Amino acid sequence: MKTTSDQALAGALADHRAGHSERAAVTYRRLLADDPGSADLLYLLGVTERQAGRVTQALALFRQSLDRAPHLLEARLNLASALLTQGDAAGAQGQWRAVLALDPAYGAAWHALGSSGAGHGGAGREEAIRKLRRAARLNPDTAQIHHDLGILLRQDDRIEEAIACQHRALSLEPGFLSAWMSLGNAQLEMGEMAAAAEALERAVSLSPGTPEIWFNLGNLYYRAADLDRALICYRRSARLGLAVARARVVATLFDQEQDAAAEAALAEYLPLEGTDVSSILEYLYAIMVRGGRAAQARTLFTRLETVPFAGRIYPVECRTALSALDLMEGDPNAAASRLETVRSDNCWMFTVRSLAALERTRRQQGWRWQRPHNADPSRPRLTSTTLGNRGRFAHNVLEYVLLRLYAEKHGCVLETPDWVGGAYFDLDDPVPSGPLPPWPFARRILNGAVMGTREVEPVLDRDAMSPLFLYEYPVAFRDRVRSWLQPRPQWKPWIDPPVDALRAVGRTVVAIHIRRGDFLQYGYPITETQTYVDWLRGLWPTLDKPVLYLASDDIPAVRAAFREFRPVTLHDAGPAWPGLEFLQDFHVLTQADIVGISAASGFSQLAARLNARARLCVEPDMKTGGIKPFQAWI
C-alpha cells in the first residue's frame, strides 16, 4: 500500500510529465522538507529549476544530488547539459566521462561527448567521430546520433558516408527536418543537383517558416546559376530572421549587376544586429568602384571608420577600402602605410596590404609588370574572383593549384584577379575579361575531374568561388606545380638574404613553423612547442653543423622554448621586407634541409611541397603527441 509521501510523489511526477513543472516543484520542496537527503528529490527539483530558466539553482541542486548519490546517471547528464548552456564545455565533458566510468555502455553519454568534442577547425574531429560511431552501435535506432555523425563526416570531407548517415536518420525519423537539410547540403557538394533539390524541397514542406531551409535552397539555385530564384530564397530567409542571408542577398544582386538594388539592400541591413558587416562593406566598395564613384567612396569610407553598426565600428574594413583606392589610383606607398600597423585576420585586408607592399617594392626597383589579357576569347574560361578576398596566401595558392590543374585538363583559359600569389610567383595568367556565372561548392567536382575519379560533363565558363584544395597531392603533379610556383626573380634581393645568412653559419638548416594567431581563436589543432623541442633533442646531435630557423606569427611566445638550440628568426637573418615578412619566412621553409610543419597549417605544408632540397619533412602527430614524417607528395 502506497504511503502518503509515495502518493504525493506520484502526483508530482504526473504534474511534471504533463508540463506543470512549477506545481511539481512545490510538491518536491514539501517532500524535501521531510527528507532533505533524498538524492532523487534534489535531482527532480533541479530539473524544474532548469526548466524555469534558473540554471544556477539547478546546478546547485544537481550537485547536491550527486553528493548523496554519485551513481545517479540522470543527474549527471542533466548537470552536464546545464554546464554546457553556461559555456562550460570542459565541465560538461567531465560529467559525461563520469557517466561512462559508471556505465561504459551508456550510449547517450557517448553521443554527447562526440557531439561536443570537435573543435571548429577540426581539432578533435576524428576522436569525436569515433565516439559517435560507438554511440550509434549502442543506440542504433536513435536518429539524432546518425544525423550528428553525418554532420562531422561531412566536415571531414567524407561526403558519401555523411549522406549514408542522413539516410539512416531519415529511415528512423522521416520527419527529421535537420536531416533533410543536411542531406540536401551534402548532395549539393557532390553535385547531385536533382537529389539535393528533392531533399531541400522536402525540408521546405515540413517547415516553410524555417529560415535556414530557404538559405540552403538559395545556395542550391546559386550553384545552378539560377540567380533569380536564389535571390528569392535568400530574401525570404533574411525576412524570416537569418542574419547570414543578408550578405547573400547583397552578393546575388551584385552578381546580377543590380547595383542600385544591392546598395539599397546593404543600407537596410548594415544597422541590423547580426549582419555580416565586414562582407557587406566589401560589396559597398566594389559597387562604388564599378560605378566610377571612387571619390565618393573615399569620402564615405573615411567617415564610416568611426560610425558604429549595431554597436560596433569597423575600422579595418574601412581602412582596407581606402587603401584599395590608394592602390587603384597608383599610390602604393599610401596604401601600404595606411595598413602597416593594422592587426587583423581579415582576408581582404591581407590581400590589399600585401599587394600594396609588393607594388611599392616593384616601383622602388623600377621594373614594369603588365598583366596580360585573354589572347584567345574563343576558348572556355575559368576564374575565381575569391582568390583576391577569401583566404590568405597559402590558402589561395592551394586553390590556384586545383584551378589550374582543372583548367589545363579541360583546355580553359584561367583568368585571375589581382592576388598575392599571382604577384609573388612568376605567373602570367590573364586578367578577368568579364563576369562569369558563380560556381560555389566546386571542390569535389574539381577534384574528381583532376584526379580522374569522376566522369562527368566538364563545367566551363564559371567563377569557382572558394574552391578549396586538392584532397591529395600525387607525385605526378609535383614537377608541374613546382614549375608554376617559382618566385619572381625580382624578389630575390629580399627573399635570398635570410637563406644566405643561415647557410653562412650552418650546414644543415632546420626550419620549423609554429602557427598560433587565428588557430587559437578558431579551434584549429595547436602545435605544442615542447613536441618539437623533444624531437630536436634526439635529432640535433646527428646533424652536421645544424642551425635552427623559427617561423611563427607569434615569435615572442615560442622562441624561448627553443633557447637551447639558439634559434634564428627573421629579425636575426634580415633585413625584413616591410609588410611581406611572411614571404621571407615562406622562402626559408622552401629552401631548408629539414622542415617542421605546424599542425594543419597550409602555409608550411605548401612550403614543404615546393621544397625540392629537403631530405626530411615532419609534422606533429596529434594522436600520439610526437612527431611523424610528412609526405608532401604521394
Image (cartoon, helix red, strand yellow):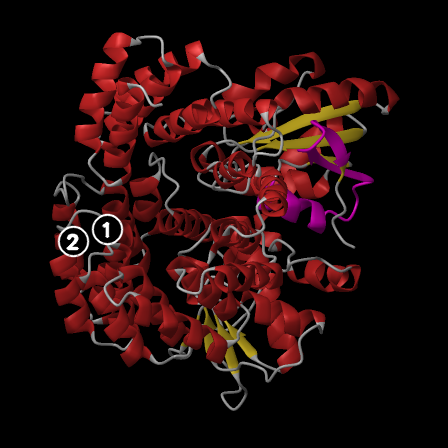
- Viewer-closest of 188 and 92: 92
Per the rendering, the mark at residue 601 is: none
Magenta highlight range: 600-628
Residue 516: percent from the left, percent from the top? 51, 31
Please say if the residues under marks 2 and 1 sit with CB atoms less than 8 Å apart. Answer: yes
**Mark 1 is on which residue type?**
Val
Residue 206: percent from the left, percent from the top? 32, 67
Q: Which residue shows up at 17% across the image and 43% down it? A: 305
Q: Which residue shows up at 78% across the image and 36% down it? A: 593
| Left or right: residue 613 compared with residue 3 | right
Q: Which residue shows up at 29% across the image and 38% down it? A: 17
Label 2 secondary element: loop
Asked if residue 516 is positioned above or below residue 164 in the image, the reply reads above
Quadrant, the N terminus: top left
- Pointer 2 local density, CA inside 10 Å: few below 14, some 14–19, many at least 20: many
Residue 553: percent from the left, percent from the top? 50, 32
Label 1 secondary element: helix
- Viewer-closest of 1 and 276: 1
Disc 2 marks which residue? 270
Disc 1 marks which residue? 277
**Mark 2 is on which residue type?**
Leu
Queried whether the magenta region covers residue 552, the answer comes back as no
- Pointer 1 local density, CA inside 10 Å: few below 14, some 14–19, many at least 20: many
Residue 426, picture quadrant = bottom right
Residue 92, picture quadrant = top left
